[in-house]
Image (tube, rainbow, N blue to C red):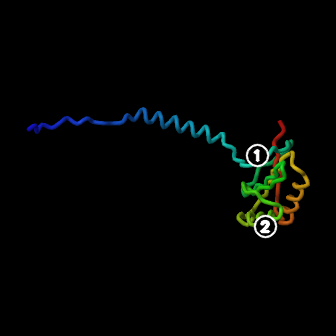
């Protein structure tokens, strides 16, 4: 009988190559995350020469060129806009509505949205792009 111990192979993982791969993955995700747009609804904003900073407690309302309204990412019909906006405004201490209307939108619909915002006595701003 052979009672000699066999020599065990040591298996190990090189740390240098692993750290290089993790560094490259981290750079990749950092670069990709900066390319992601914060706005979920694509709206082509009109340009303006003057603009101010956006307040913190905002409720974004989008009006698209095909007459659809959104509060944040949720589609809203005009009949429910007032109640949903009222619910959203109660979530903040000082709510500010930011109206983001497409420059190709029907301005009659935009005025209807403004009327709802004013009926709730909420401060609002109209979002624009800066002129270059």
Q: Residue at x 57, y 40 (%)?
A: 29
Position of residue 75 measured from the top left corner of the image (x, y, whole percent): 76, 57
Q: Are marks 2 and 1 in contact (CB under 8 Å)?
A: no
Position of residue 23 measured from the top left corner of the image (x, y, whole percent): 50, 36
Q: Is residue 122 left or right of residue 38?
A: right
Between 55 and 79, the residue placed more toward the observer is 79
Q: Which residue is mark 1?
A: 42
Ranked by sequence position, the earlier of labels 2 and 1 is 1
Q: Which residue is mark 2?
A: 83
Q: How many marks?
A: 2
Q: Residue at x 30, y 36 (%)?
A: 11
Q: Among all residues in the image, which is located at the extreme right?
A: 108
Residue 51 in view: yes
Local SS, label 1:
loop
Question: Relative to residue 82, is residue 32 depicted above or below?
Answer: above
Question: Relative to residue 16, is residue 57 depicted above or below?
Answer: below
Determine the CA span between mark 2 and mark 1.
Answer: 24 Å
Q: Which image quadrant: the N terminus?
A: top left
């Amino acid at each position: 009988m052979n009672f000699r111990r066999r020599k065990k192979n040591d298996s190990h993982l090189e740390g240098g190559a692993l750290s290089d791969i993790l560094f490259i993955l981290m750079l990749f995700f950092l670069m990709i995350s900066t390319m992601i747009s914060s706005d979920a609804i694509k709206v082509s904003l009109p340009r303006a020469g003057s603009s101010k900073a956006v307040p913190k407690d905002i409720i974004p309302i989008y009006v698209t060129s095909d007459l659809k309204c959104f509060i944040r990412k949720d589609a809203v019909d005009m009949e429910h806009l007032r109640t949903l906006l009222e619910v959203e405004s109660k979530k903040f201490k000082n709510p500010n509505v930011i109206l983001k209307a497409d420059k190709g939108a029907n301005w009659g619909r935009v005025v209807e949205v403004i009327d709802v915002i004013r009926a709730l006595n909420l401060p609002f701003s109209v979002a624009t792009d800066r002129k270059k």
